[in-house]
Amino acid sequence: VQLQASGGGLVQAGNSLRLSCAASGRTFGSYTLGWFRQTPGREREFVAAIRWSGGSTPYANSVKGRFTISRDNAKNTVYLQMNSLKPEDTAVYYCAAAQRTLITSSMTRAQMYDYWGQGTQVTVSS
């Protein structure tokens, strides 16, 4: 499975961006997809996740109500709609895929994911 993240960029605070993560190599089937972010000197941080088969979509408290994760089965693509962006959202955003349907408590843990995209930079200016 190859994951290609795109859609990052430089925006002013309060604006929006939509990140995309396109998968190739196989269809997602029973996979779990997640978005994480990382800033220099800090550990990779969970942002949001979604099961390809549906169900709950956990979010980090810091993005709840502002970010929305979704999927397009036909396009084998996962999206992260980011609204009301803040300077503290500045990070490299990574998409990740786990080869199984994770329980909700596991969806937030980076070590549960098997494949990672290359990351896309999001910079929010104040």
Image (cartoon, rainbow, N blue to C red):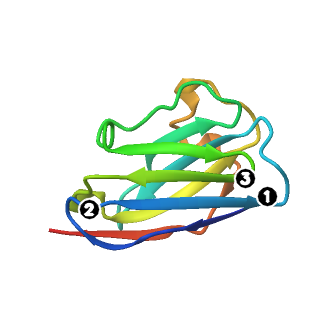
* Label ID, residue 98: none
Q: Nearer the viewer, residue 74 or 111?
A: 74
Q: How many labels were placed on the picture?
A: 3
What is the C-alpha distance between the residues marked 1 and 2? 32 Å
- Of badges 1 and 3, nearer the viewer stands 3
Decide which of tag 2 and tag 3 comes sooner along the chain. Answer: 2
- Residue at 26% of width from left, 62% of height from top? 15
Q: Amino acid at mark 2?
A: Asn
Q: Amino acid at mark 3?
A: Asn
Categorize mark 3 by other alpha carbons within 10 Å: few (<14), some (14-19), many (20+). Answer: some
Residue under the image location 51 percent in, 31 percent down:
57
Q: Which residue is mark 3?
A: 76
Looking at the image, residue 35 lies above or below residue 20: above
* Few, some or many residues within 10 Å of mark 2 (<14, 14–19, 20+): few
Q: CA distance from mark 1 to mark 3?
A: 11 Å
Q: Position of residue 120 (x, y in %)?
A: 49, 69
The quarter of the displayed image where residue 43 is located: bottom left
Residue under the point 31% across and 52% down: 83
Does residue 83 appear left or right of residue 1 in this picture?
A: left
Quadrant of image for the C terminus: bottom left
Which residue position is annotated with label 1? Answer: 1
Where does label 2 land, which residue?
15
Amino acid under label 1?
Answer: Val
42 over 106 or under it: above or below:
below
- The first of marks 1 and 2 along the sequence is 1
Write the residue at 49% across / 60% down. Answer: 19
- Foreground pick, 66 / 94: 66
